[in-house]
Each structure stands twice: as structure tokens, then as C-alpha cells.
Image (tube, rainbow, N blue to C red):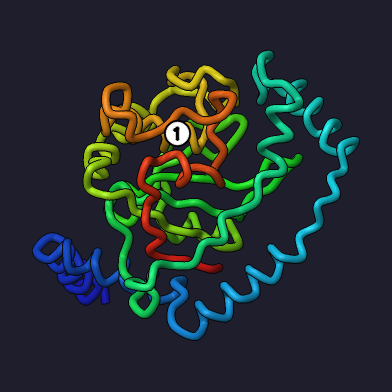
Amino acid sequence: MKKRWNVVLWFLFGILFLFPGQVFADELGNLVEKYALTGEELDKFEQQEQKIQNTRSSVVNYDELYENYVNFKAQGIFGDEVSFEMFLQEATTPAPSDPVDVRFRSVAGSPQPGDIMITNGTSFLGVTGHAGIFIGNGKILSIGGGGEKPSEMPIINWMQRYKGWTKIYRPAAKFNPKTAERWAINNYRNKNISYAINNRIFEKNPTYCSKIVWQAYYYSSASPQTGLVRRPLFDIVYPYTLPNLFSQKPVHVATWNS
């Protein structure tokens, strides 16, 4: 029996060693097929989403939001310079509801390095949305929240942790997605950087999810010279507004749902 298991293990090792790209591609393809919405399923999802947007209440519970704001301040999640007005802007920003581009509606394509991942799968104490950048090998780079550090997360873990939808946006080639991916890896992956939200947009420590993505593209597209990526309001990047900070809006290539 032991000999048989050794043969099986060596066989599997041989497959992974000799054909790693194919094995990985198959695994990623299975994940995409499991989570990606296409065709009629996507149509129904977007119709329902639009219906929710049209009936979205404009009533804001300021007392509850202010209590959340005070709690964040006490935990050190918000810097001293983050005002209630700034927090209110984030808490009341609607989720993106633009449809998947017509070129991708019937094809569950795999994400590409540099793709921007935005999910509604987290909403705590009034902070809505979460963002990450796809770095290849089936992984997404982001920072989860208070007490965490920037790290990579396999797609399957992302979809299990952030229940809800994940929308994938692909910036045009002029924004240098591959360079942005490498910048994010080199500057943030597994670095000893803490989580906090402030308006020091050009600093790396502390950081938060959408700030990592914004910085990666801001620096990789030479935005100080070209203006391709704009500075956000209050110098705070909100996950739901990330696509709107590009001079040419990234293409919405896929919506996944868990």
C-alpha cells in the first residue's frame, strides 16, 4: 500500500513539475466557471441590481453613521485628519452598477495581471466595499482590515471570505497593468505595513485596500506627468469609486457571484 501511494505522489509531482502552467490554468478555469456570471444569468443579475439601485433609499441615518465613525476613531482605523464628512462620503457612495462590457458577456474569461477586483462582500461599521489587484497565479493582493498586513489571497479564499459579488475591471494598456501588478507586489506583498485610513495618499504606511490599487496605477502610469490617474476627493480612495479615477474608465470584464 505504501509503495502504491509513493507512486501516486510521484505521478502527481511529475504533473505539477512538468506541466505547472496547464494544471494552474485548469484550476483557474474551474474557478472562473464556478463564479462568473454570463449570458442569461448575468442579464438577470444586472436587471435585479438596477432595480435595487432605482429603489435605493436616499435616507441616511446620520446618528448611526456618526457612532460608527467615533468607534473607528477610537480603534485607530481612522487618522486624526479624517473628518466625519470624509467618512460620510465613503459610507454613502453607491456601489458600481455598470453592466459587463458587451464583448465579455458570453465568455467567462480569466482575470489578467493588473485587473482591479472590487467586491461588496464586506460592509462593517459603515465602511462599504473592498478592493484588490490581481497578481497572476490565481491570487489577489490586498489588505483585509484592522490588524492585518498586505498579503496575497487565492481566488477561492477571496470568494469564500467576501460573500457577494466581485466585479473585475481591466485598465487600458496605456495604464501599464503589468507594471502596476509588479509595483504592488514589490511595494506591498508581505510587507510589515499596517492598516489605517488617512488622507496621506502618497505614503505607504499605513495603507488600506483601495489605496494600494490606486498607488500601483498612479505610479505605473506616470500620473504625476501624464495625469492618467486622478487624485481622489479628500485624498482618500474609496473602493467603489476606483474605476472613475482613471482618465479612461477601465473595462468591466466580468462579474462573479458567490
Of the pair 109 and 226, the residue shown nearer to us: 226
Question: Is 57 situated left or right of 180 in this image?
Answer: right
Question: Is 159 situated left or right of 111 in this image?
Answer: right
Residue at 63% of width from left, 50% of height from top?
Answer: 122
User: Looking at the picture, does residue 139 appear above or below residue 149?
Assistant: below
Residue at 49% of width from left, 85% of height from top?
Answer: 40
Residue at 47% of width from left, 75% of height from top?
Answer: 37
Residue at 71% of width from left, 65% of height from top?
Answer: 54
Q: Position of residue 56 (x, y in %)?
A: 76, 60
The residue under label 1 is which amino acid type? Answer: Pro
User: Looking at the picture, does residue 110 appear above or below residue 34?
Assistant: above
Residue 13, quarter of picture: bottom left
Q: Which residue is mark 1?
A: 150
Q: Residues within 10 Å of mark 1 (few under 14, many from 20)?
A: many
* The furthest residue to the right: 63
Quadrant in which the N terminus appears: bottom left
Of the pair 156 and 254, the residue shown nearer to us: 254
Question: Is 126 situated left or right of 225 in this image?
Answer: right
* The furthest residue to the bottom: 40
User: Looking at the picture, does residue 139 appear above or below residue 247?
Assistant: below
* The furthest residue to the left: 18
Q: Position of residue 94 (x, y in %)?
A: 65, 51
SS of the residue at dot 1?
loop
Tally the marks: 1
Quadrant in which the C terminus appears: bottom right
Residue 187, quarter of picture: top left
Q: Position of residue 158 (x, y in %)?
A: 49, 55
Q: Position of residue 104 (x, y in %)?
A: 35, 71
Of the pair 24 and 242, the residue shown nearer to us: 242
Question: Is 42 situated left or right of 29 in this image?
Answer: right
